[in-house]
Image (cartoon, rainbow, N blue to C red):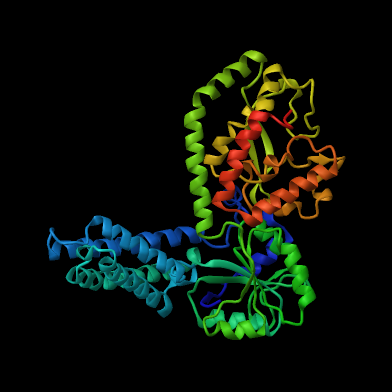
Amino acid sequence: MHGVIPPEPGQGKLMAALAEGWPRYTGSLGAQRGRVVGMGPQPIPAPWLASGQFALDALSIGVAGLLARDLVGQGEVPDVGVLLFGIGVALLLLALAGGYRHAALFGGRRPLLASAGALAGAVLGLALAAPLLGVPEAMPANATALWLGLALPLLLAGRVASARLIRAEAPRTALRAVVVGEGPQAAHLASLARSRQPGPVRLLGVVDDRRRLPDATHGDSGLPHLGPFEVLQALIRRGEVDQVILALPWSAESRVTALLRRLSDYPVDVCLAPDLCSYRARQDTAPLHLLHRPLAGWRGLAKRAEDILLAVGALAVAAVPMLLVALAVRLDSPGPVLFRQRRTGFNNRDFYVLKFRTMHTDQTDHEARVQVSAGDPRVTPVGAILRRTSLDELPQLLNVLWGEMSFVGPRPHAPGTRAAGRTFEEVAERYAARHRMKPGLTGLAQVRGWRGPTETEEKLLRRVEADLEYVETWSLWLDAVIILRTLVAVVRMRNAY
């Protein structure tokens, strides 16, 4: 890790109050957004920053190519097709060189050298490949030299300007990190914070179970002491922490293992910065990453783009059937068409899913205390058909568009739902880890047949195992397979009541 930002003045008092009780420091707006008032401005997600830099780089290379065509002559090449291909190759090489990592966006010599190397490799590579492919006129020497000569200063100037802007907005662009541990390791990190600011990581303070009471400072590090591990858990649940740094020596293997076990259920990056890594951090080497967020960086953008495209497409196809279903529900029994039920979603936050009402209004179970079984008298005739075909889930496409759910992911459960008389958290030790990703309309557990009521603990354990496998192995291809298998499962109508 390099270039960390020291904490803002007064954060020690804030954290002390947080340890005593959250309500004193949460206002209406902060509560709605799930953030703590006083912890700084709303952060800009790292994928957005990388996307902005990506677009700026593409624009710089493209503008240079168009200028080269105009200066050389319209009859010359590279034409638009060659330009687009060259831009794509250059951006791919730059991405492979780490040019869009969060730390690289804050500037430095290495990102600039990577940018220059990627551009030169793409343009010169095309120029050398053209004769081998039998089309030397595609990249003539004069056009190639002019394109490279114009694109290089534009690309580097854009990189320098964007890095300055990002550093100027460091309170919003830096990753928010909490240090776990004490001693020389924490002191090294704090020293690094003072020597390199602003930077891509902002240290909020130190968490240490061996000091239960919060304090304005923490030993030699000078960082605010936030309190015990429970405070860190609360901060993560409220979306206030992006990264946890374990500042522990190599000899603390058992403590590191225990902390990793506790942190593996949370959607944060976990790094290890023992003595050796703290020293190397001064040489611009990051601490060792032990745990990664499931959808960090570009993966999160790809997942969100997939959700929006699929939800919009599904709504376009299902709009008329949904109107017919709504009419059938209305005519079948008195009461509202839609049913709202509280569910637990990403990062253990509750939200309300939308469903077509399938029960009689006076028998609806908003808390899901009793799971629906075959022949349940509470279910209406139309509701039985909707549940059997999963059509009652269609309104959740709106939850996907609102960003509360994904098209594919672990299915959301109602708080307090039980398996064989015990809560899900009591049955499955790592149940909370499935909330590291947004819940979905369908998931790996469902296509494997683990859907419907959980009368036994075994059914829940198999479902959680599949959910955790999905979280740890996610890919766009896996989502495509699950969607296809879901369509087959809906046709067969298995395990649906």
Specify whether residue 240 is in view: yes
Q: Position of residue 242 (x, y in %)?
A: 59, 63
In the depicted structure, whether residue 211 falls above or below residue 183: above
Q: Does residue 52 appear to the left or right of 263 in the view shown?
A: left
Looking at the image, the residue that sits furthest to the top is: 331
Q: Position of residue 293 (x, y in %)?
A: 61, 60
Q: At 36% across and 70% down in the image, what residue appears?
A: 159
- The answer to which quarter of the image holds residue 230 is bottom right
For the point 34% across and 72% down, the residue is 121
As drawn, the residue found furthest toward the right would be 421
The quadrant of the image that shows the N terminus is bottom right
- For the C terminus, the image quarter is top right
Residue at x 17% of width, y 71% of height: 142
**Image position, residue 384 (x, y; %):** 71, 22
Give the number of callouts: 0
Left-right relation of 387 to 55: right
Nearer the observer, 199 or 385: 385
| Visible residue check, residue 339 | no
Location of residue 200 with respect to 357 vertically, above or below: below
The residue positioned 75% from the left and 68% from the top of the image is 259
The answer to which image quadrant residue 153 occupies is bottom left
**Residue 189 vertical position relative to residue 42 in the rendered view, above or below:** below
| Percent x, y of residue 172 | 49, 63
Where 30 sits versus 105, above or below? above
